Image (spheres, rainbow, N blue to C red):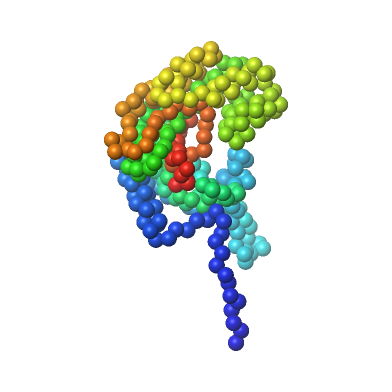
Amino acid sequence: MTESPLVRPVPVSGFPEWLPEIRMVEQKWLDLIRQGFERYGFCSIETPSVEPLSVLTAKGETSNEVYALRRLQEDADDASDSRIGLHFDLTVPFARYTAQHFNELVFPFKRYQMQRVWRGERAQDGRFREFTQCDIDVINVDRLPLYFDAELPRVIHEIMTSLNLPAWTININNRKVLQGFYEGLGIDDPPAVIRAVDKLDKVGPEGVARILSGEVGLSARTVDSCLALARMRGTGPAVVDDIKGLGVTSDLLTEGLGELSYVLDSLGNCRPAASSPTSRSLAGSTTTRERSTKESSSTGRTTAASAPAGATRT
């Protein structure tokens, strides 16, 4: 009788598993997040773990992160399994879900999803290949009322407070501010500049400047203006005045600053809990950032992302 070979258990890098006491904390957090979403009238949906590769790779920029799925013993004549992959976020599945069920949904549609996602990137401290993403969105058929842009960061503020995390900041930006500012500078391709500025934390100001001058073809003066906006930070409505002080004007920029000002004013009464041991703040930010617990309106106006200090993504 042949004995089975001994298999030594080895953890797979980037795919965490928790001991029972940590799992209990995770479940409590997920319950608190779920309760926070539902308190504001968001309904839960769940989509399959897989989507067609054509959907997942439609934008091209995330194709390197997608895990393709296939059977080891797949049929040579059946290529269906080779055309699916694990979703890397919940935004792409939600877009497909909305299009598929459009005639069955009631708008504005407020939904939340709390599911596992998978990203084929190099595992490192605080970055996993598999993690749970908690995502909320509001979508509408025509124009989405601006108050939803203020409601979403309020939801995350309440949830983060209930989790009693050590220190965190809510970063709020408005894409109209970015695009309008670049249009005011006479830039023909604002999305290319936005993509370059998004790399500020990774490559630094000098790296962004090289991209803007070498790849996008901007003058040195225009590059300096783009970096001045990218570096800008502020707490509360004062950041709007700081942006105006840069001396750039356009109709879209004026519209975006008005929306950003409305959102920040609406959140003026969001304060740390009295028992909070550390500082928490609402900050106006002029760069887009990767989200952890994430929520956004469908218009692309205002995005709010919470960033706990030293926390992993949930």
Q: Please name whichever residue, 273 or 177, is drawn nearer the observer in this view of the structure.
A: 273
Q: Position of residue 153 (x, y in %)?
A: 39, 33
Q: Position of residue 129 (x, y in %)?
A: 54, 51
Residue at the limit of the structure toward the left, as seen here: 274
Q: Position of residue 40 (x, y in %)?
A: 31, 38
Q: Please name whichever residue, 226 or 148, is drawn nearer the observer in this view of the structure.
A: 226
Is residue 296 visible in this depiction of the protein?
no
Residue drawn 44% across the image and 58% down it? 18
Image side of residue 40 versus residue 129, left or right: left
Res 217 → quadrant: top right
Residue drawn 57% across the image and 45% down it? 56
Residue at the limit of the structure toward the bottom, as seen here: 1
Q: Position of residue 282 (x, y in %)?
A: 40, 30
Residue at the limit of the structure toward the front, as seen here: 277
Is residue 264 visible in this depiction of the protein?
yes
Rendered position, 164 above or below 236:
below
Residue drawn 37% across the image and 37% down it? 278
Res 221 → quadrant: top right
Res 240 → quadrant: top left
Image side of residue 11 versus residue 304, left or right: right
Rendered position, 206 above or below 36:
above
Rendered position, 238 above or below 274:
above
Mark count: 0
Q: Quadrant of the N terminus?
A: bottom right
